[in-house]
Image: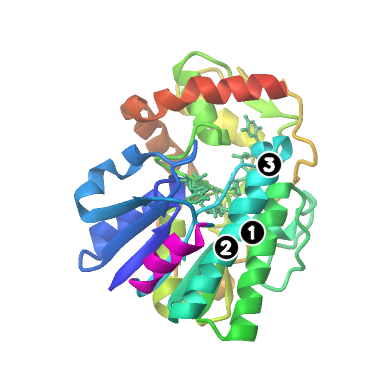
Amino acid sequence: MRILVTGGAGFIGANFVHLLVREQPEVDVVVLDKLTYAGDRASLAPVAERVELVVGDVADAALVDSLVARSDAVVHFAAESHNDNSLADPSPFVQTNLVGTFTILEAVRRHGVRLHHVSTDEVYGDLELDDPAKFTPTTPYDPSSPYSASKAGSDLLVRAWVRSFGIEATISNCSNNYGPYQHVEKFIPRQITGLIDGVRPKLYGTGENVRDWIHVEDHNRAVLDILERGRSGRTYLIGADGETSNLEVVRTLLEIMGRDPDDFEHVPDRPGHDLRYAIDASLLREELGWRPRFTSFRDGLADTVEWYRANEAWWRPHKAATEARYAELGR
Ligand code: NAD
Ligand code: TDX
């Protein structure tokens, strides 16, 4: 069994590769990753001997065709993933997320290879703070940002390729992930590494926005379950009932790191900032028996703080350039 993991040098992809190598040692793992600013060879260093890393673009049709031809399954994580970047320059989002997914689809169609497409809950737009509803697999798509619109488009391409060409594919839409190897541009690692450097956390707008946090390992175990037992053509929502406001996240981090919980600052809001995401994962729980293992967000955050403290050599090279980009945006 050989699995091609696109985007395997990024945050979730690298954690997925670590999990595969640890728990399914009989599987051959090939990673296709362009090593953009978000990809880092160092994220695969602990498993380098066990993984073949091909540096290349998911939109390179000839390369993708040759890799898919020798694979039994493809797990497609590769994407431009940061909303703030998509507001500054949408072009790589359209290229990688749409054209890249199209390129993968054409290759799996030619070679009859099983695909799992990794997507986000942001395709559904956002919910009001007091809305009892959560996103379900039948919630209409209503993306807000160039990032989420490009992911929504990629999901729709997968659905069309299943229906029109009969490819064997599943889709998952997951809520916000946290854990080791997450780029320092993202909310939680930005604040942890800032605090290590003595910088106060930066909350966009009021901080009342809610994200449904899930540990990256719980996300990846769900992806493995879907890959093994999911029904082709189905969309599975992945979430662990982790709704927390950004303000609460910042206060918890400050407390874990031994600071005053009120010692943060408000910065200008993200344009079009989605208010709240919330996932109903009952299909995943009922059909596939998946359960999250990280049931305490506070404990998971404390582990993550420890990881960033112990792995400064991994994140430090990315920190200054990331903060320079934020300085240009005034955030
Ligand atoms: P990331 O930005 O950390 O990693 C993306 C990886 O893809 C990087 O290694 C990058 O080098 C690679 N890549 C980018 N463009 C490429 C291209 N053209 N060709 C080949 N490789 C390319 O992202 P992440 O947070 O790990 O997200 C992975 C996937 O999970 C994405 O599809 C994202 O939409 C989805 N997702 C993320 C979250 C989250 O909270 N981070 C939640 C739900 C879904
Ligand atoms: O410094 C910050 N301060 C702040 O208040 C940053 C970087 C973010 N925020 C807010 C914005 C969001 O409400 O924190 C929340 C989380 O922000 P991000 O980490 O940028 O994540 P988000 O925009 O919610 O998207 C994430 O989850 C869904 C991932 O980046 C996406 O790839 C995924 O699809």
Residue that badge 3 annotates: 86
Nearest the viewer among 14 and 304 is 14
Q: Is residue 321 left or right of residue 126?
A: left
Task: Give neighbour class at mark 1: few <14, some 14-19, many 20+ (Cα, 10 Å).
Answer: many
Disc 1 marks which amino acid? Leu
Q: Position of residue 229 (x, y in %)?
A: 42, 79
Q: Is residue 89 left or right of residue 35?
A: right
Q: Position of residue 225 (x, y in %)?
A: 41, 71
Instruction: Determine the image quadrant of residue 99.
Output: bottom right
Q: CA distance from mark 1 to mark 3?
A: 13 Å
Disc 1 secondary structure class: helix
Residue located 27% across and 41% down the image: 45
Disc 2 marks which amino acid? Thr
Which of discs 1 and 3 lies nearer the camera? The answer is: 1
Vertical side of 117 occupied by 83: above or below: above
On residue 101, which mark appears?
2
Residue that badge 1 annotates: 98
Residue 308 part of the magenta segment:
no
Residue located 63% across and 20% down the image: 264
Residue located 44% across and 69% down the image: 290
Vertical side of 330 occupied by 159: above or below: below
Instruction: Determine the image quadrant of residue 238.
Output: bottom right
Disc 2 secondary structure class: helix
On residue 248, which mark appears?
none
Q: Quadrant of the N terminus?
A: bottom left
Task: Tell me where the magenta segment starts and ends, as one range.
Answer: 60-70
Task: Give neighbour class at mark 2: few <14, some 14-19, many 20+ (Cα, 10 Å).
Answer: many
Q: CA distance from mark 1 to mark 2?
A: 5 Å
Disc 3 marks which amino acid? Ser
Residue at the far front in the pictured view: 62
Residue 69 part of the magenta segment:
yes
Which of discs 2 and 3 lies nearer the camera? The answer is: 2
